[in-house]
Amino acid sequence: MKLKASAILLAGGKGIRMGESVPKQFLPLAGRAVILHSLEKFEACDAISEIILVLPEDKIDFFNQEILSHRIFHKLKKQTVGGVTRQDSTNSGFQWVDSTVDVVIVHDVARPLVSSETIQECVRVAYEAGASLAASPASDTIKECNEQGEVVATHSREKIFQAQTPQAARYEILKEALEGAYEEGFQGTDEASLIERIGKTVKVVVTESSNIKLTRPSDFVFAESILNSLK
Ligand code: CTP
Ligand code: MG
């Protein structure tokens, strides 16, 4: 069965930790803006039927004139304004999603190295299990500490994963999770945490650690070296 998925691409942040005057999603990576890399990945993916792009309110004109310019993305259905938190931005994008899709997939534009395989697999697993997220196995042993910085527990590494995006869910499940979070004043840092809260299964799609998020300047150096090694 061919699944139909709507993608919410999150580019509504300010990129404070990057320390540049322009938010990181608009900075160049290997010759073109980070946001274009992410748009291209989702545009090219068979399972994706539409893209909702979430942008900072004061950057919509800049994005269209300076970054998007003459480029055409056929699946880009809507540009909308983000909110104060990442969750607010997801919720804002969700309002424009075609309610007949099988799955909604949310992705941080700041992760431009995501592979088509990961996107497809997140959609497929979300449809089967209800919800999914890309994650990489922890490579270090994880210590849990108290407020004094004293170790109180050591967690078995085999069960620890680092959450990334994409994060996907069946349309109805993400709707229920978002509505529940706002009704109860809950803010989560990712979609999975909202879905876990309502007691639904979220399944991990194991990805390469190269699906990095561009957070600080050194991440651009790392991302460019990964892109060069793929050439
Ligand atoms: N994001 C968003 N709306 C927000 C906050 C974040 O759409 N209110 C998006 C960012 O644009 C990014 C992704 O969510 O693609 C992951 O967030 P993060 O890496 O934290 O980006 P920023 O919030 O922009 O960076 P910082 O936290 O350093 O300010
Ligand atoms: Mg942030």
Image (cartoon, grey):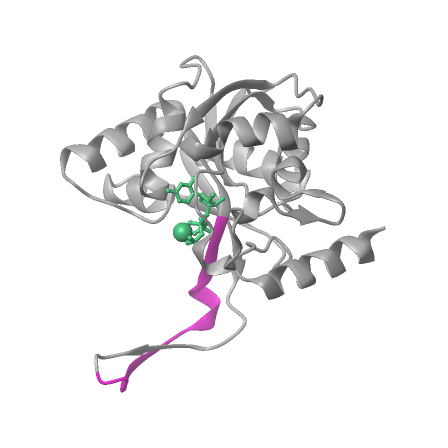
Give the residue drawn at x 44%, y 55%: 16
Q: Assess whether residue 109 is covered by the magenta stretch.
A: no
Foreground residue, 145 or 40? 40
Residue 50 seen in this snapshot: yes
Q: Is residue 140 above or below residue 165?
A: below
Foreground: 8 or 121?
8
Looking at the image, residue 103 lies above or below residue 33: above
- Which is nearer the eye, 40 or 180? 40
Q: Quadrant of residue 114?
A: top right
Q: Position of residue 14 (x, y in %)?
A: 44, 47
Residue 11 location (% of width, % of height): 49, 38
Picture quadrant of residue 170: top left
Q: Along the horizontal axis of the image, is 71 left or right of 85?
A: right
How many numbered discs? Answer: 0
Q: Is residue 90 above or below residue 149?
A: above
Residue 185 placement (x, y as % from top left): 16, 40
Quadrant containing the N terminus in the rendered view: top right
Instruction: Please tell me whether residue 157 belongs to the stretch shown in magenta.
Output: yes
Task: Determine the residue located farthest toward the left in the rendered image.
Answer: 184
Please report the residue visible at 65 percent of the width from the left and 27 percent of the height from the top.
68
Q: Position of residue 46 (x, y in %)?
A: 66, 24
**Can residue 110 be seen in the rendering of this structure?**
no
Residue at 25% from the left image edge and 41% from the top image edge: 199
Question: Residue at left 46%, top 31%?
Answer: 54
Q: Which residues are magenta?
A: 148-164
**Extreme residue in the right direction:** 231
